[in-house]
Amino acid sequence: MNRQRKPDFTDNPAAITMKQFSRLYQIDISSAYKLAKQPGFPAVRVSKQKILIPVKELEKWLADHKNA
């Protein structure tokens, strides 16, 4: 049985990059960017080439969409 472990954000900053997000949740980077474009997903564009995801907002979004 392959049990997925919930990512531990205790040692991470308040926000993670798209690359970190895709690695933590084992999805390809293009899927991460598609998800970031979805309404309501907590992604913040901080520059033309950089998007950050606030960890607390991500955890809330994941809990709200657990069974979606």
Image: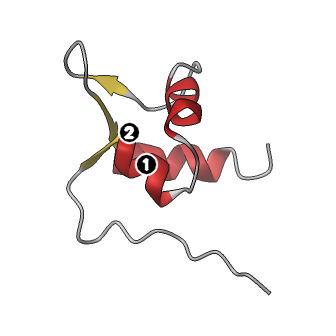
Q: Report the residue at 51% width, 48% height from top.
A: 60
Can you say whether 56 is above or below 54 in the image? below
Query: Quick one: label 1, few (<14), some, or many (20+) residues within 10 Å?
Result: many
Q: Amino acid at mark 1?
A: Phe
Q: 63 or 13: which is nearer to us?
A: 13
Q: Amino acid at mark 2?
A: Met
Q: Report the residue at 25% width, 19% height from top.
A: 49
Q: Report the residue at 24% width, 62% height from top.
A: 12
Name the image quarter holding residue 42. top left
Residue identified by numbered label 1? 21
Residue that lies at the very extreme toward the bottom in this rendered image: 1
| Disc 1, SS | helix
Image position of 54 (left or right of 57): left
For residue 3, which numbered disc appears in the image? none
Q: Report the residue at 54% width, 71% height from top.
A: 6
Name the image quarter holding residue 19. top left
Can you say whether 39 is above or below 21 in the image? above
Quarter of the image with the C terminus is top right
| Residue 21 place in picture, x, y as percent | 43, 48
| Disc 2, SS | helix
Can you say whether 2 is above or below 18 in the image? below
Q: CA distance from mark 1 to mark 2?
A: 5 Å
| Residue 28 place in picture, x, y as percent | 56, 43
Quarter of the image with the N terminus is bottom right
Disc 1 vs disc 2: Cβ atoms closer than 8 Å? yes
Query: Quick one: label 2, few (<14), some, or many (20+) residues within 10 Å?
Result: some
Image position of 20 (left or right of 11): right
For residue 18, which numbered disc appears in the image? 2
Image position of 39 (left or right of 57): right
